[in-house]
Amino acid sequence: MNVRDLLTTEDAAEPQGASQAQDQEIVQSTEQTEQNETDEDATHEPAQAAPHALVPLGDDDQFSDGSSVLDAGGRSSTASLRSSILQYREENGRTYHSMSDGNMQHHLWIVTWGGEICLSPKVEGANRVLDVGTGTGIWAMEYADLHPEAEVIGVDLSPIQPSHTPPNCRFEVDDVDKDWTWSQPFDFIFVRHGNSCFESWEKLLRKAYDNLEPGGYIELQDNAFPIHSDDDTLKDTSLAEWSSLLIEAVQKMGRSIEAPSHFKRMLQDAGFVDVVEIKEVWPLSPWTRDRELFYRGDWVRDTSLKGIETSCLALFTRVLGWTREEVLAFCAGVRNDFKNRNIHAYWDVYCAYGRKPLQQTPATE
């Protein structure tokens, strides 16, 4: 059992993100010539995105839920947003995305990272790419569309990906906790929403390291539990209890949903160099005065609501010993908290990437 589907639902409506009030300032190495330098112990200081102010809405703030990412002139207010995000449809007076609503989470990530599909130097120039835990396959297909010269493989336990894919993209059903049997190495491995999905992050990163060619990159993206608040509005809520209970249940399974806050150290321990970490936030509802965070919160709330019961039923009944009726009653309270903009809660979200050195490190010998 994993909680990767916590924020991915098939039927949730997807309001479009607003203009970005501040550009992310991400310091990263992009020149391949740097790989010619001695790199056994090389690491970079973590690159942080420009902070957004987690300030609650005031009485005079005029944002409204579900506003379109397009301004009155039909121009994207965020220049770097991918064109796919701007494809929208109107239904019942609200803006929906033209792609499957089950892929909303992907677009939330794209908006979070300023329109980028990934943040490592392999945003360009990869030849052989592996998308671990591909889910609906949307990331793999979009990467393949953007880079027709690359071979992209998406792998997951469930065959839920579409049958029509770009010619340079294919999907495989496999368990990455078992031995990896790919005959050729990759130069880019991407892992998103792996929280609680793997028996051991250490073993997964070891396999990724061994299946990367020297100089290849791995990138990890995920939201981290617990849920946070900078004031007292989260205290004694069903939302706070939900966060704590999910952590407890997953820990009893021998796994963790707190791993993303440790991604940087995990990559370094696995032998990767030039490790960079970027941290952002996801408000759990549109409660912030910061315009970009307001619309992120709109998306997070809508994508979360229909996944609450899915995240709880099996875990709470099988691991914590709750009855189904107890779980459903509890989830109703959690749903109400997601809708309550007086609760100023948020997730920390992380991206971390690193490079396999050109020379073997002691950690991999």
Image (tube, helix red, strand yellow):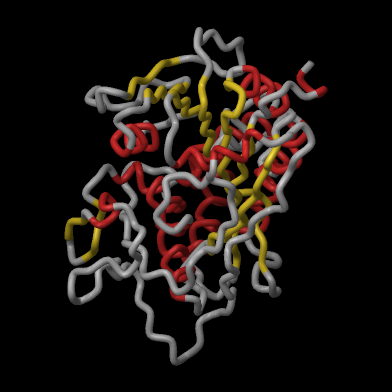
* Quadrant, the N terminus: top right
Q: Residue at x 47, y 25 (%)?
A: 130
Query: How many tags in the picture?
Result: 0
In this picture, residue 7 sits left or right of residue 163: right
Residue 4 position (above or below residue 45) = above
Residue 44's x, y, as percent?
Answer: 71, 48
Q: Residue at x 50, y 70 (%)?
A: 340
In the foreground, 77 or 225: 77
Residue 115 position (above or below residue 20) = above
Q: Going by the picture, which residue comes out furthest to the right?
A: 362
In the foreground, 348 or 326: 348
Q: Residue at x 65, y 29 (%)?
A: 356
In this picture, residue 127 sits left or right of residue 261: left
In the foreground, 4 or 167: 167
Residue 296 position (above or below residue 310) = below
Residue 216 position (above or below residue 351) = above
Residue 117 shows in this picture: yes
Quadrant location of residue 204?
A: top right
Q: Going by the picture, which residue comes out furthest to the bottom?
A: 60
* Quadrant, the C terminus: top right
Residue 193's x, y, as percent?
Answer: 53, 39
In the foreground, 142 or 214: 214
In this picture, residue 316 sits left or right of residue 305: right
Residue 246's x, y, as percent?
Answer: 65, 43
Quadrant location of residue 347?
A: bottom right
Q: Residue at x 57, y 12 (%)?
A: 180
Residue 316 shows in this picture: no
